[in-house]
Image (cartoon, rainbow, N blue to C red):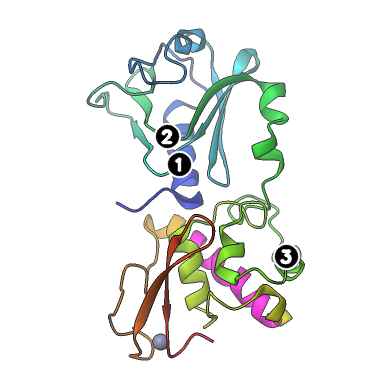
Amino acid sequence: MSLPEGDTIHRAARKIQAALGGREIALADAPSPRSPIHSRSGELAGSTLELAEARGKHLLLHFSDDQVIHSHLGMNGRWFVRADGRLPYGKPWLLLASGGAVASQNGGKILRLVSASRARNDPALLQLGPDPLRPGFNPEAATERLLAYEPSAAVGEALNDQSLIAGVGNVIRIEACFLPRINPWRKVGDLTEPEARAIVDATVWVMETSMKRGSRPKQIYGRSRQPCPRCGGRILTHGQGDDNRVTFWCESCQH
Ligand SMILES: [Zn+2]
């Protein structure tokens, strides 16, 4: 399974909203001793889930009585959502159930139970850039943000920055460079306006297509040394950025 990116989280939010939205939570538990809210999950029992929403790679569950679950899956977290009464195996970090509907999180980078005002003022959320999967996303404005980004940064590195466009992860950024034939090692300062717009449009396309199909469209991710599906050239790979994310690109058709 691929790592969680914004599309994964929007999909989880939609499933949770469909399964538990508007319902009173009958069971709230955090049986794993490693859960950051191990001792506090019971506070949610009896409250109603008003809205499940994704913001980039963050997921927020807004409950009545002003409580919010703030979650980020990081590299290894998972949401499990069922409407058929089946419970997840093991001891999840969070388990919410109502009738036959169950949502649970296991693992992750962030799992907090906070007040609505604390969630609203969370620095990690305030600094997020626009999210292509949220209403009101404006591709022109996102293009301007990309063109105004640190000129010496590589394009592939800039796309990793959640303050530029929220929800873009490793697969999305690689495919969003491949589609418009942009080399991810190009400097942002070297992009023309139409090139920047093409990267933004490709990012939106990959994320929206993933939501429609239920899986991310992938052409070159993970295909090191294989022939490019577009031109037959060789797919190269190398770590990129401070956190050395593995990057793939075609040596022949991405410039
Ligand atoms: Zn190629």
Indicate yes or no whether the magenta region holds residue 207.
Answer: yes
| Left or right of 15 on screen, residue 60 | right
Q: Earlier in the sequence, mark 1 or mark 2?
A: 1
At numbered mark 3, what does the secondary structure look like: helix, strand or loop? loop
Q: Position of residue 13 (x, y in %)?
A: 49, 38
Quarter of the rendering occupied by the C terminus: bottom right
The residue tagged 3 is: 149
Tag 1 and tag 2, C-beta contact below 8 Å: yes
- Some atom of ligand 1 lies within 8 Å of the CB belonging to the residue at label 2: no
* Dominant SS in magenta: helix
Going 60% across and 71% down the picture, which residue do you hit? Answer: 154
Task: Estimate the x, y position of residue 6 in percent, counting from the top left.
Answer: 51, 50
Tell me the element at label 2. loop
Residue at left offset 46%, top offset 89%: 253
Mark 1: amino acid: Gly
What label sits on residue 74 in the rendered view? 1
Q: Is residue 156 above or below residue 163?
A: below
Q: Is the residue under label 2 in contact with that under label 3 (CB below 8 Å)?
A: no
Residue sitting at 34 percent across and 34 percent down? 80
| Residue type at the position of mark 2 | Gly
Spatial distance from mark 3 to mark 2, Cα to Cα? Answer: 29 Å
Secondary structure at numbered mark 1: loop
Q: Where ligand 1 lies, by quadrant?
A: bottom left
Magenta-drawn segment: 194-209
Vertically, is 191 above or below 171?
below
According to the picture, the residue beneath numbered tag 2 turns out to be 108
| 120 vs 245: above or below | above
Total labels: the figure holds: 3
Left or right? Give the position of 204 relative to 2: right
Magenta-span inclusion, residue 34:
no
Query: Does label 3 or label 2 sit earlier along the sequence?
Result: 2
- Residue 181 image position (x, y, % from top left): 52, 83
